[in-house]
Image (cartoon, coloured by chain):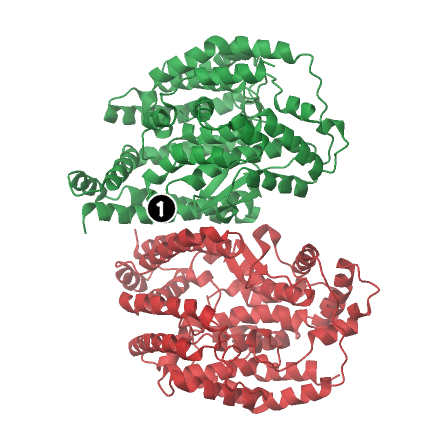
Chain colours: A red, B green
Amino acid sequence: MKAIEKIEKQFQKLSSYSHLAAICGWDQATMMPDGGNDARSKAMSDLAVLCHETLTDSRMGEWITTAESDTSLTNEQRTNLREIKRAWTQATQLPSELVEKKSLLGSKCEHEWRSQRGKNDWPRFAENLKKVVEASREEANTRATQTGVRPYDAMLDLYEPGMTTEKLDILFGDLKSWLPNLIQKVLEKQKSTVITEPKGPFDTDKQAALGKQMMEILGFNFNHGRLDVSVHPFCGGVPSDVRITTRYDEQDFTSAIMGVVHETGHARYEQGLPKSYAGFPAGEARSMGIHESQSLFFEMQLGRHPFFVDHLATLSAEAFDKQDDAAFGRENINALYQRVRPGYIRVDADEVTYPAHVILRFEIERDLIEGKIEVDDIPALWNQKMQEYLGLSTDGEYTNGCMQDIHWTDGSFGYFPSYTLGAMYAAQFMHAMRKTVDVDACIKALDFTPINSWLEENIWSKGSTLSTDELVIQATGEPLNPEYFKQHLIARYLID
Amino acid sequence: MKAIEKIEKQFQKLSSYSHLAAICGWDQATMMPDGGNDARSKAMSDLAVLCHETLTDSRMGEWITTAESDTSLTNEQRTNLREIKRAWTQATQLPSELVEKKSLLGSKCEHEWRSQRGKNDWPRFAENLKKVVEASREEANTRATQTGVRPYDAMLDLYEPGMTTEKLDILFGDLKSWLPNLIQKVLEKQKSTVITEPKGPFDTDKQAALGKQMMEILGFNFNHGRLDVSVHPFCGGVPSDVRITTRYDEQDFTSAIMGVVHETGHARYEQGLPKSYAGFPAGEARSMGIHESQSLFFEMQLGRHPFFVDHLATLSAEAFDKQDDAAFGRENINALYQRVRPGYIRVDADEVTYPAHVILRFEIERDLIEGKIEVDDIPALWNQKMQEYLGLSTDGEYTNGCMQDIHWTDGSFGYFPSYTLGAMYAAQFMHAMRKTVDVDACIKALDFTPINSWLEENIWSKGSTLSTDELVIQATGEPLNPEYFKQHLIARYLID
């Protein structure tokens, strides 16, 4: 058997094991009764070890070297090999003791955070976080030494291959120069807007039916996926069987429905990944930022488009039998979905204030990983930046400040920028799509075929066969340009 | 690390992998959209190979030998080792080429059977079945040679450790001597019974709610399990998270509900298995026959007990808002659940005629595996035995004759006897339980705690720590005695 065939065989096994991990992970979040958790966690952890062992098999390095000098490889095999090597390199960069140490420290930090957060107990949380940061610095330095980049770049590469701190400094620096001012202008403009909150309760079965109607409209393939319920919405499963979830609030249907639209974006990407590379890294999503660009394309570019919200107002009034309720009027529902309100919590933020949360996180974690600041510095920096970007004070407030989310507890430093990169890519894709697709007319007619075809052709079907830059240039004619996101915000929130 | 510890570690991994296989298998039957099937089947098959490799690891034989002579083992470890050796021996008895050949022939036979059955196409089916029988004979002979037993005994041992053809010939020979006559007497007695079928439609959500109410009453632990829907009802999952299923017919609720009671018996056994042996063979169900004894204890001994059916009549009338419907009267529902009707199809058979189907299968498969008859002889034998046991002709009828079920297509020869062994064990357990538990009063009061406690103490908590004979003797004071089953049938169906 040729080296490339041995590699492919190994990755097919890995793909099968990952498939089962994805389904059982979904089950754990949606179906499993509480009492099943201990045995399940153990089983999942044993499978994670197996996946790691399969990927880092001792013969893999030699196979890769041999395959790289095999002149008989097809172009597809070369592409596959490049991404396989990327996955293998990342998996083998760290000594297993460090992987285990980081995993244990992360689990402890996250577990205790669950109760510490409610008690606003920063000192105790900080104790754990310091150890996680220490291990993450070790990870960043270990990875950076081997690839000759700066430490935070090594972490970014796990989520955004090709992205660097230098580029982010420029991108987010630009954003920071105009965003706080734009937020104030939008607030000023929306000051006089009167919004009537639709009054519940809204039957959750009806919310689910409305969500599925939205998925159907947006082209979700129900022969290859499902919608279910979980505490934290996510998109899981495998490309041939994509499992998305949402959560229902009986008093507010608007959030569950837009959540479904968001996850449908993730799901369509997964469903549209190239079948010819199925089960291989080259057939996977390009990066977290590109994944988020698809969910935000669906949620922000399509889902909150005034024409789409018009339909949503009509369909939700029908779903809940509220055709005569003024709160379900198109203008009111549009005002509701475009409301901008600076707040403490990132996940509750609207699309205008959201980047401010991300820039704050990026600036802190960048300096934290590279040793320019310490964990003890975080609260003051948080407060200062919240004041500067959103005009809010978090002095003495940790629960809704630097203890609000889970990303740092398990050492996922380098992940936060993906959210705002996604928003920027989404705006740029929309700009490019408009050159050949009459997007407004499509949305008005609820005909998403041309829109989905563009995304499928330019983004989904590429998987990881191109670098992010190549992907974006092929799709839009230029590399990432934050101007499109700025123009999108101005057009939607400041121009009538 | 001591040999026993190495073995235990290996089996913990195996247990984790099996856990994930069980959950993903359940998902495949209950949740997965059709389009997910190809990738799932591939993933499940890769996991099955991994499980086999883990169990048959080349070092295992040496570890077992070393552990067997380790005098420091606790009694628990010795018990564990005995069952581990059993599992390992069975898994290593066959050359992997034979395992693969049998699996491929079985898949092909089953796949083509799905369309051949509808066409009554015995000649084509027989072609495939001959190959499966040939491979199964090879399996039986290979196993038998290594253990010094006769071929069919080697197959029985896979499902019913300790059971032999000789014992079955006696047990089923006895049954055969009185069953056909008893069936005729029951038919004579029921001839004048008038039954009114409850008239649907019965909302499936309400059927599900009623099913869950039954599970609750019978002590199913919903913190460690669920009820869902599948085409073929089954009990799956793992002891900490037991997944049972049923199917709903809008025109007939009685079958789904009694199906739930049956699966609840399987589930309670799984939920009650010894935690101290969790993940090890000694912590698993003793045999297929003992498993079936629990589902049949719940369905036949408890579920069709007239006092239980009285409650079921009341609760189902409430569930479907039919309190004034005569069809929901206690006597009518009891008559319905006790109706005996000889028929062609085993899975639709009542508890009186069911053993006739099993004896027929046993007699044919025993002789088939041991080369005394050939596949071409099956239709004539089937017809002759159906006439003899149930008074029905299957001449020229294959769809509802020897092509009706799936067991032989994949070579599961040796499995059929478990069904009737289960019915016999159930009757014997009930007889023994009555010595210390006032079963009738408990059922009348819907208080299943004393009944479940007896089962938990005598059956469930034993797992596979005892042999089947030891288990039955400890629980009832004697080995399997078919007289109790006979007395149960006479008491329920012939005495007023």
**Looking at this rendering, what residue extends furthest in the right direction?**
A324
Residue at left offset 63%, top offset 61%: A248
- Residue B479 percent coordinates (x, y): 36, 21
Please, what is the three-letter code of the amino acid marked with disc 1? Answer: Ser
Chain under label 1? Answer: B
The image quadrant where one finds the C terminus of chain B is top right
Q: In this rendering, does residue A193 appear at all?
A: yes
Frontmost residue, B132 versus B70: B70
x, y (%) of residue B115?
56, 30
In the depicted structure, whether residue B206 falls above or below residue B397: below
Q: Position of residue B383 (x, y in %)?
A: 53, 12
Residue B40, placed above or below residue A319: above
- Quadrant of res B334: top right
In the figure, residue A442 lies in which quadrant? bottom right
> Residue A230 lies in what quarter of the image?
bottom right
For residue B465, above or below residue A263: above
Badge 1 is on which residue?
A: B15
Pick the residue in front: A344 or A447. Answer: A344
Q: Is residue B334 left or right of residue A144?
A: right
Please say if A281 is above or below A347. above
Q: Is residue B387 visible?
A: no
A139, B101: nearer the viewer: A139
Residue closer to the observer: B341 or B457: B457
At label 1, counting other C-alpha atoms closer than 10 Å, the crowd grade (few under 14, some 14-19, many 20 or more) is many
Residue B450, horizontal then vertical, whole percent: 48, 34
Q: For the residue labelled by badge 1, is the local secondary structure a helix, a strand or a loop?
A: helix
